[in-house]
């Protein structure tokens, strides 16, 4: 029986796992924030939308690196976990160093939201660059 993860099957395997990990990451992020992003966004809070937009972008960078460098789906999953954890730790550190940012986002202050989204993307870039096979 041929191995199912070759050629197009391999693409779909990596792609499906990446989408699942992306969804889980956004779910984990929204679970640890002290405000409900989706409710704030529905109420027109652009700051909440900005921070939440930075989250999947920031995580996609190490996730893409994991896909590109992995020897298989398990390897990709393990590398992605490093990125997953690093992104959440970075958010926690930002909350400790700049605790007012959380209140600012709830109040719709865009400057703080841009900073949080920027940190997410910056950490994602460094996170991806740090991954070596």
Image (cartoon, grey):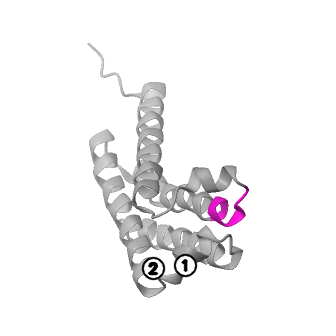
| 49 part of magenta stretch | yes
Please give the range of residues in magenta: 44-50
| Residue 107 figure quarter | bottom right
Give me the residue at 47% from left, 47% from top. Answer: 22
Q: Residue at x 39, y 28 (%)?
A: 6
Q: Which quarter of the rendering shows the N terminus?
A: top left
Q: Residue furthest bottom?
A: 97
Q: Nearer the viewer, residue 45 or 118?
A: 45
Image position, residue 21 (x, y; %): 41, 45
Q: Is residue 96 above or below residue 29?
A: below
- Drawn side of residue 35 relative to residue 115, left or right: left
Give the residue displayed 44% in from the left and 57% down from the top.
Answer: 29
Q: Give the class, few, some or many, for how many residues have Cα within 10 Å of label 2's Cα (few <14, many ≥20).
A: some
Q: Residues within 10 Å of mark 1 (few under 14, many from 20)?
A: some
Per the image, label 1 sits on a secondary structure element best described as helix
Relative to 83, say whether 109 is above or below: below
Q: Is residue 107 left or right of residue 56?
A: right
* Numbered badge on residue 94: 2
Which residue is situated farthest in the top direction here?
1
Vertical placement of 15 versus 128: above or below? above
* Residue 94 drawn at (x, y percent): 45, 79
- Between 34 and 21, the residue placed more toward the observer is 34
Position of the C terminus by quadrant: bottom left
Point out the tag, 1 or 2, that comes first from the N-terminus.
2
Q: Position of residue 10 (x, y in %)?
A: 42, 31
| Quadrant in which residue 37 is drawn | bottom right
Q: Give SS at disc 2.
A: helix
Location of mark 1 (residue):
101
Measured as percent of width and height from the top left, residue 95 is found at: 44, 78
Q: Are marks 1 and 2 in contact (CB under 8 Å)?
A: yes
């Amino acid at each position: 029986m041929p191995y199912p993860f070759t050629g197009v099957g391999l693409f779909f395997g990596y792609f499906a796992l990446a989408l699942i990990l992306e969804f889980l990451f956004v779910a984990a992020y929204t679970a640890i924030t002290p405000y409900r992003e989706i409710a704030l966004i529905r109420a027109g809070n652009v700051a909440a939308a900005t921070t939440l937009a930075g989250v999947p972008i920031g995580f996609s960078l190490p996730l893409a690196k994991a896909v590109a460098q992995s020897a298989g789906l398990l390897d990709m999953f393990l590398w992605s976990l490093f990125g997953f954890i690093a992104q959440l730790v970075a958010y926690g550190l930002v909350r400790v160093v700049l605790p007012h940012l959380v209140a600012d986002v709830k109040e719709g202050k865009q400057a703080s939201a841009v900073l949080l989204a920027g940190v997410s993307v910056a950490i994602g870039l460094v996170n991806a660059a740090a991954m070596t096979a």
